[in-house]
Amino acid sequence: MRVVRLASEIDFDGWRKAARALRAEGVAPDAVVWTVEYDLFESAVIPAKAGTTASAGVSGGPGPTLRFGRDDNGREKPFTVPKPFIDLAEQVVLHRSGERFALLYKLLWRLEREPGLIDNPADPDMTRARDMAKGVSRAAHKMKAFVRFRLVEGVEPETYMAWFEPAHRVTERVAPFFARRFTGMRWSILTPDACVAWDGEVLKVSEGADPADAPREDAQEELWRTYYASIFNPARLNPRMMQQEMPKRYWRNLPEARLIPDLIETARRRTDEMVAARPNPPSERVLKAALRHARDGSYGENDPLTLEDAAAAQQVCRRCDLWRDATQAVPGEGPMRARIMIVGEQPGDEEDLSGRPFVGPAGRLLDKAMAEADFDRRKAFVTNAVKHFKHEPRGKARLHKTPDRGEVQACRWWLDAERRMVKPRVILALGATAVMGVTGKSMPIAKSRGAPIALDGGVQLVVSWHPSYLLRVPDADVKARAYAQLVEDLRLAKSLGGGG
């Protein structure tokens, strides 16, 4: 039995060197025991602009391939390891699982005999490694989202400190992100694994710390709680998704955490009060302009100045006849300066009754796809190409009817107004009607999706399937493929928009 003692829990370079030697000697995976000799840090420096650490066992990455093994004459054999495996291994090493080093060596051992292993989605060892890598990636994302700095009292120059407990050993991997984000601020992040500190010029790493070493509350935390309570929307509450995005394990280090249980408990009552409350009437200026626009189709100098003005004005729009049978217009909703605008086709039955977009079955399927794509709907502006529900009665039900070209063109004025005010970087058009509303022309979804399309003003258009199509298509394989493509397109839109 061979015992390999690595220098630290994240000693990728040590694992790589040992694995190379063991593989060259032909030592089988079940004949190797991987262990960590110690987990202490000497003072080290991390390059602030790099994505990985340059010390404590984490490498910036090798070349595209690595050669392993020797033939019977002692010459090096031409066995190479693909770069995707090296990239995967660098992630997996940061996982807390005790089997990570052994699993990676087992995969390395198999790669010579199974060159397609890295691309095999069904292999259990590869699945386990990919799951570990995803867990590490999620831990890095959560660290970026949930670190909260506190002012260290009585220290000059002004210094901030945070305590964080990452799910995996990602502290050094993520540290350069904070150096870039808070370049002009002196700060330290303490974790049980390692501590990182930025003095404005150099990013240093040292051994792990204890929660008692971190400062307690400062004066800014009350401001943060006030802000969080003011932006909390009880009507959008989904506790399961919220805890998926903000797991409870992080709550104890968040200033807003003490508010969350009460906000959840009172969300239903507050939502009922919001629904029961009468909407604010549009201003006289907006109402007159909307009525005039309903007659002649032109606002001119009286264009709506805010999204609230536009939403109010849509309620008196008469540009087409759809208003006659609809309960109300359904305006878009979301941040005024959202980077991503999601455009659906038209409101459905539940949207028509509630006055909000994407809250019916299609909206719930979209929420599911967003969760899978790690896409935060609250950061997007969600709207429809047509603002009134077009339908036909079928017994007690109201069945959706596709808007015709004239109705889409008539409502395009409102969509353009929302675009001018929101100024999105990316527009995600779901379905053919949405594409027509955005571009003014028809485009086949199957041929248009998968790659961004440039629009005027530097805006990128991403085309995808409307969730209602997935609900209607009878073929299970077609439905699964279209759903996977919708998730893929959400990820693409998020990437182009700089996160979501």
Image: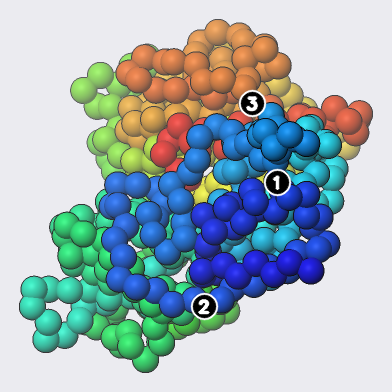
**Name of the residue lying farthest toward the top:** 441
Given the current orientation, which residue lies at the most extreme right position? 475
Determine contact: label 3, label 2, CB under 8 Å. no
Task: Say whether residue 12 is left or right of residue 348.
Answer: left
Q: Closest to the observer: 254 or 213?
A: 213
Task: From the image, state whether disc 1 or disc 3 is nearer to you.
Answer: 1
Which mark's residue is nearer the viewer, 2 or 1? Answer: 1
Name the residue: 24% across, 57% down: 182
- Which residue is label 2 attached to? 38
Residue hosting label 1: 24
Q: Is residue 47 left or right of residue 375?
A: left
Q: Disc 3 designates what residue?
A: 464
Per the model, the C-alpha gap separating discs 2 and 1 is 26 Å
Count of numbered marks: 3
Type of amino acid under label 1: Ala
Query: For the residue marked with disc 3, what is the amino acid?
Result: Ser
